[in-house]
Amino acid sequence: MNRILLPLVMLLIFVIEGSLFQVFAPEQYGSDLLYIPRFVIVAMVIIGIFLGRTHAIIYGLIFGILYDVVYTELLGVYMFCLALIAYLLSVSHLYVRRSYTLVVLVTMVAVFIVEYFTYGINLMLNITEMMHEEFFSRRLLSTLGLNFLFSLILLYPLRKYLLYLKQMEEFQKH
């Protein structure tokens, strides 16, 4: 049961990110800011920090493919980006794991990189005409704020669960 719960939680986060958030999106109520939830990325990085790089890369590949199929016309952009982010930012160093501030900072760096990477690809392929200043002021800052709040909410319970999984994994080895 413990092994299947984490993928189910990630799938639930993916569904919430893609469907429920659209109902409550501030831009539907007259806001000029774009709030892009990147909850799967936040959770993936937290998983990488506490369970290791391999878990994060697997989740990055799987949910990257899901992002590509569900949200974009270009296959492979999110798959590559999420796997790369998982590889680069899954710092399982004990010092990082102990500090909530560092974990949140690493998740914000991940969201920042994903936003700029996808913006750059879309700009390069002429899929978007949004200028950098508009992207930065209208989308990037609000997206970082939203995902910052989500990472603060998610970090404590997910950390406790991941440490429990790691402890159970070590217990089963002995």
Image (tube, helix red, strand yellow):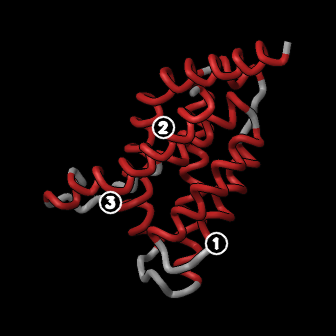
Closer to the camera, 118 or 24?
24
- The residue that appears at 53% across and 60% down in the rendered structure is 115
Residue that numbered label 2 is attached to: 9
Depicted 153 relative to depicted 172: above or below: below
Outermost residue, bottom side: 126
Residue that numbered label 1 is attached to: 76
- The residue that appears at 51% across and 87% down in the rendered structure is 126
Q: Earlier in the sequence, mark 2 or mark 3?
A: 2
Q: Are marks 2 and 1 in contact (CB under 8 Å)?
A: no
Outermost residue, front side: 1
Give the mark toward the camera: 2 or 3. Answer: 2
> Which secondary structure, mark 2?
helix
Residue 122 falls left or right of residue 29: right
| Alpha-carbon span between mark 3 and mark 1 | 24 Å
Residue 1 falls left or right of residue 30: right
Depicted 77 relative to depicted 11: above or below: below
| Alpha-carbon span between mark 2 and mark 3 | 26 Å
Q: Quadrant of residue 18?
A: bottom left
The numbered mark at residue 34 is 3
Outermost residue, right side: 174
The numbered mark at residue 65 is none
Query: Callout 1, which amino acid?
Result: Gly
- The residue that appears at 42% across and 83% down in the rendered structure is 129
Residue 88 falls left or right of residue 100: right
Closer to the camera, 55 or 101?
55
Depicted 124 relative to depicted 72: above or below: below
The image position of residue 72, as x and y in percent, is 48, 74
Give the mark toward the camera: 3 or 1. Answer: 1
Label 2 crowding class (10 Å Cα cut-off): few <14, some 14-19, many 20+? some
Query: Callout 2, which amino acid?
Result: Val
